[in-house]
Image (cartoon, coloured by chain):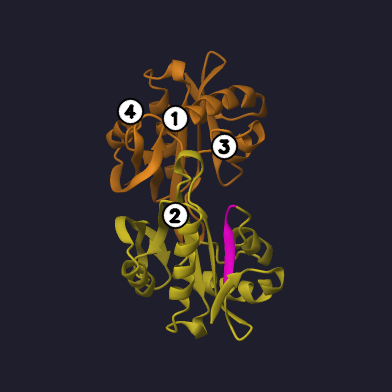
Chain colours: A orange, B yellow
Amino acid sequence: MRVRVFADADWPQVWQIVHEVVRAQETFPYDPAMTDGQARDAWIEAPPGLTVVAVDRDRVVGTAKMGPNRSGPGAHVSTASFMVAAADRGRGVGTALLDFAVGWAKAEGYAAMQFNAVVETNRSAVELYRRHGFEVVGTVPRSFAHPTLGRVGLHVMYREF
Amino acid sequence: MRVRVFADADWPQVWQIVHEVVRAQETFPYDPAMTDGQARDAWIEAPPGLTVVAVDRDRVVGTAKMGPNRSGPGAHVSTASFMVAAADRGRGVGTALLDFAVGWAKAEGYAAMQFNAVVETNRSAVELYRRHGFEVVGTVPRSFAHPTLGRVGLHVMYREF
């Protein structure tokens, strides 16, 4: 498996992953009815941001986007988002994408990385981020409507480099 | 003073306030070099969001925008942003705008309101929000580059209705 910059030809496979993730409504506060075009606008980053794919033998198994979390006085902090195809979870795809994003942010001169909305019941993500040095700096209670668990919290997670 | 929905003819006065606030770089993580057009895109909300102005004898003294904080499973939480002209601070303009935004969010059926990035050194804003029932649920350290104070924290503040 390797991580490389997104190319236009990847979009059908990336959209399949995005569609699966947002329809599940378990991990992303995105509209589950978002269209192909809306998803593309949301996921494909223009510079100074970047979108990448994790590829296993020409098959896209995960994707990430990264860039500044805010503008102006907040632009020294990066952010990133990650999605892995359901069939390919537990194989280190998330770790590979996270490693790439942190490496990219350091190389670009960012001072830190922030995740704004990590669903607290998404244990694999929370644990992955903790193992990579991110801490929960706060949890907004009941701010995510999970389809089976009801309203659960969203963590803000942060790591300085 | 009254608060009413933004009209196109208000833009020159609103832009003057936005320009003043973002150039100061003390309270908003916006690009201080943002253009008139970028500011308009950022500040004027399309439905389901709303932009309003506080008006004192035909003069715009402040402005606010409000809407869903996130999409899909996060769309039951609202957010809002407020700007008051420097010359008109300390006269209750912020309170009037906040009251309007909270009333609007309740009427629209939101369950809560969240502020994502309140500069911790912006005491008047932090105190105003606290008086209106908002609590700091977390502070992202050193995530805002203040022009004189250096890197200070950004509070996430939250209130349920």
Residue A83 magenta? no
The chain to which mark 3 is attached is: A
Q: Residues within 10 Å of mark 1 (few under 14, many from 20)?
A: many
Q: Are marks 4 and 2 on the same chain?
A: yes
**Residue A40: image location, x then y, percent:** 62, 35
Secondary structure that dominates the magenta span:
strand
Counting residues from the N terminus, which is met first, the one under dot 1 or under dot 4? 1
Instruction: Describe the element under mark 2 as helix, strand or loop.
Output: loop
Counting residues from the N terminus, which is met first, the one under dot 3 or under dot 2? 3
Can you tell which of label 1 and label 3 is closer to the viewer? 3
Instruction: Describe the element under mark 4 as helix, strand or loop.
Output: helix
Q: Farthest residue in the right direction?
A: B9
Counting residues from the N terminus, which is met first, the one under dot 3 or under dot 4? 3
Can you tell which of label 1 and label 4 is closer to the viewer? 4
Vertical placement of residue A75 versus A101, above or below: below
The chain to which mark 4 is attached is: A
Q: CA distance from mark 1 to mark 4?
A: 14 Å
- Is A56 left or right of B48, judged from the image as shown? left
Q: Which residue is mark 4?
A: A124
Which quarter of the rendering shows the C terminus of chain B? bottom left
Under mark 1, the amino acid is: Leu
Q: Which residue is mark 2?
A: A76
**Residue B49: image location, x then y, percent:** 57, 56
**Which residue is depicted at the point 59% across and 72% down?**
B4
Give the extent of the magenta segment: B48-53
